[in-house]
Image: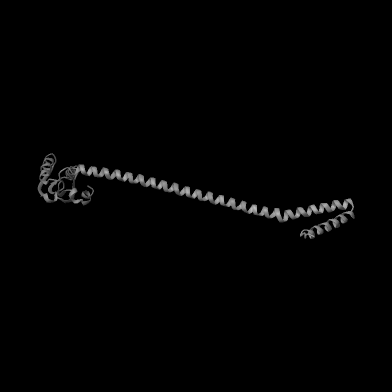
Amino acid sequence: MRFNIFLPLYNSYQAIQKAFEHFLATKTTREKYFLAATIVLCVCFIVIDFIYLPLLEKYSALSRLHTHTLKEFALSSDSIQNATSAHLEQSQNIQEKLRITQENIALIQSYLKENTKEPHLNPFALMSELINFAKTHQLSLSSFSPHATLDALGIEGMGSFEEIVALIYFIESHRFFSVDTLSFKPFNDALIHFNIMVIDYRSKNPIYRELL
């Protein structure tokens, strides 16, 4: 006789089935409906408690995690976008300032190169201009002190305050000439004794030559 490993299980199933049929045979129809309803409720409870609720809890947790991740991603994207925009704007501002600076340097260099073609102050040539100026104004020029090596000219004379101001304005009207020192000494109620040192300021400005 061949041994069957499923035979004990089959016998147990048959016994349980007979016992259940006998149990149902002893019950009324109303009790059978009540028993069926009880079994259905128990099955529903088991399904809800052990299957549905754990799945719902996991789904809620995953949903919250997904929502939080989306918010973090949105914040990170906004931060990156803002930082990129700020960096781009800063780079554009720097480039614009650099362009303006380069244009200004180019203009300055061009201006300086053009103006250095003009000769430096010739004290002796300036003396004749000052003498002609004094002839048309009430000025008395008593002495000149030329300094050819320094591109400078000392002027000593006398005149009214208004005429001295006109003389200074005449000197300053030259592009590269400037009054370096100026001293006054009252002579009388109407006249003032003055001493002026005129220089070519290009000779005293090393930065001027470095820019060329």
Left or right: where 95 falls relative to 158? right
Left or right: where 109 falls relative to 48? left
Q: Is residue 128 above or below residue 45?
A: above
- At horizontal 45% and vertical 49% (from top left) the residue drawn is 83
Q: What is the x, y in percent for residue 4? A: 77, 59
Q: Give the color scheme: rainbow, by chain, secondary structure or one colour.
A: one colour
Number of numbered tags placed on the structure image: 0
The residue closer to the viewer here, 22 or 104, is: 22
The residue closer to the viewer here, 96 or 54, is: 54
Left or right: where 25 falls relative to 177? right
Q: What is the x, y in percent for residue 121? A: 14, 46
Q: What is the x, y in percent for residue 5? A: 76, 60
Q: Quadrant of the N terminus?
A: bottom right
The residue closer to the viewer here, 196 or 185, is: 196
Left or right: where 63 falls relative to 162? right
Q: What is the x, y in percent for residue 27? A: 89, 54
Residue 147 is at least partly visible in this image: no
- At horizontal 70% and vertical 54% (from top left) the residue drawn is 53
Q: Quadrant of residue 118?
A: top left
Residue 47 is at least partly visible in this image: yes
Q: Quadrant of residue 19?
A: bottom right
The residue closer to the viewer here, 122 or 80, is: 80
Q: Residue furthest top?
A: 136
Q: Quadrant of residue 16?
A: bottom right
